[in-house]
Image (tube, grey):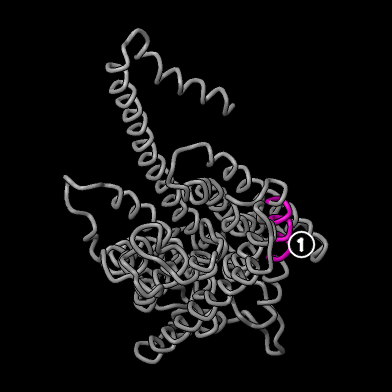
Amino acid sequence: MKMRSAIIALLVLALPVVGLGAEEAAPTVAGNKAAIDGVQTNLNYVWTLVAACLVFFMQAGFAMVESGFTRAKSAVNIMMKNLMDFSIGSLAFWAIGFGIMFGVNKTGWFGTSDFFLSGWGGPDSDAWVLAFWMFQVVFAGTAATIVSGAVAERTKFTAYLIYSVTICAFIYPVFGSWAWGSLLNGSGWLEGLGFIDFAGSTVVHSVGGWCALAGAIVLGPRLGKYGPKGEVRAIPGHNIPMAAAGVFILWLGWFGFNPGSTTTGDTSIAMIFVTTNLSAAAAAVSAMFTSWVMFKKPDVGMSLNGALAGLVGITAGCANVSPTSAIIIGLISGILVVLSVVAIDRMHVDDPVGAISVHGVCGAWGTLAAGLFNMEGVTAKIIGVQLAGIGAAFVWAFGVSFILFKVIDSVIGMRVSEEEEMIGLDISEHGAHAYNDFQTLN
């Protein structure tokens, strides 16, 4: 295949110069090469922006998963949170976050330029910074949205807006600058060590997952989640078909998330598509069988979260592990997410959608797996750097988020009243029903 492509390229260059003298041929060859380079540049723009659209569509998937896995009386609130995650998050990332993440960074800790998209010089300047910003802002929205599910059904809307802005403007971009700063104008201490996280198992997902963990701890569990003796009580979601549709949308969106991270329209995206899909499929299967063994029935919620766990798990290593390794990574992700959901529930950390397990735990596993299954070779140094990145993400994201949530809680309060929680956030926070004339309080 590569030989055929090379022959075609040579013919494209050679045909116009047949019969020409050397003096006439040289500029023609140069002109054809410039034309080919121009086509490739335009393709890079198109692929990056199409991928950004796919990742943006994941917002719909997250909203549907979270709403489906929770109760009808808070569905409007969940849709509002997901809408504002991206809307307010886009403005925060434009003003501050993008500069911190990708601006000039002489220290390796955070950027100091490119705020308010100042790196774009106007219509006559290079437009790549715009395409790159568009692809990166949908990632920032994803990191913020992860938190929404873990704090569902009991969080004040005003409090949610405050920490959503903070995640997009500060928490996510700082760690992103450590790992990805050199993708534009910056540099980061973690990437300087050789940290592998191609599309964000840790940069996006673990950071979002550890923020979610902090929020769930500060908020406490939903009313009735745990009995007087500490027993775990299930609170079923109101619309599993909606949640399932959301998972399929997320799976589709991940074909922009991982392959799109090349920001290049070339043959390298083929393998990334394959590794992404195989990991998700393997994880869905292993999660189903794990839940079957543990609960005596193949659990739909665990199976759906298994697919997401496989997608998160392969995100770091999608470009540097083989298809076979992707299946192994997915199989382990599917088992891990079921065990993690059960363990976190038993610790009395109430996470209605399993966001901490899917994104935090499986994001950490995927980052380690990117080193363990690295096709270019595995060394103690690589594993050490991966572990350092995992640890740094937890300390930074959980530590700063925990402080943030505590401050918000002490100033305006994080949680709605018991009466408001019983009625549902749709009425108490937004004065609306998700399913008017068809809905009971539960």
Furthest residue to the front? 22
Region rendered in magenta: 326-337
Q: Which residue is drawn at 40% across and 17% down?
A: 14
| Magenta: main secondary structure | helix
The one nearer the camera, 138 or 77, is: 138
The percent coordinates of residue 23 (x first, y second) are 28, 18
The percent coordinates of residue 35 (x first, y second) are 32, 28
Q: Residue at x 37, y 68 (%)?
A: 168
The one nearer the camera, 266 or 397, is: 266
The percent coordinates of residue 106 (x first, y second) are 34, 72
Provide the secondary structure element on which disc 1 rests. Answer: helix
Q: Which residue is drawn at 62% across and 46% down?
A: 277
Give residue 84's quadrant in the image: bottom left
Q: Residues within 10 Å of mark 1 (few under 14, many from 20)?
A: many
Magenta stretch containing residue 164, yes or no?
no
Q: In this view, does 70 lie to the left or right of 432?
A: right
Q: In this view, does 434 lie to the left or right of 394?
A: left
In the image, residue 423 above or below residue 59: below
Q: Quadrant of the C terminus?
A: bottom right
Magenta stretch containing residue 327, yes or no?
yes
In the image, residue 392 above or below residue 302: below
Residue behind mark 1: 291
The percent coordinates of residue 215 (x first, y second) are 49, 79
Q: Which residue is drawn at 37% across and 66% down?
A: 101
Q: In which quarter of the image is the N terminus?
A: top right
The one nearer the camera, 52 or 105, is: 105
Give residue 361's quadrant in the image: bottom right
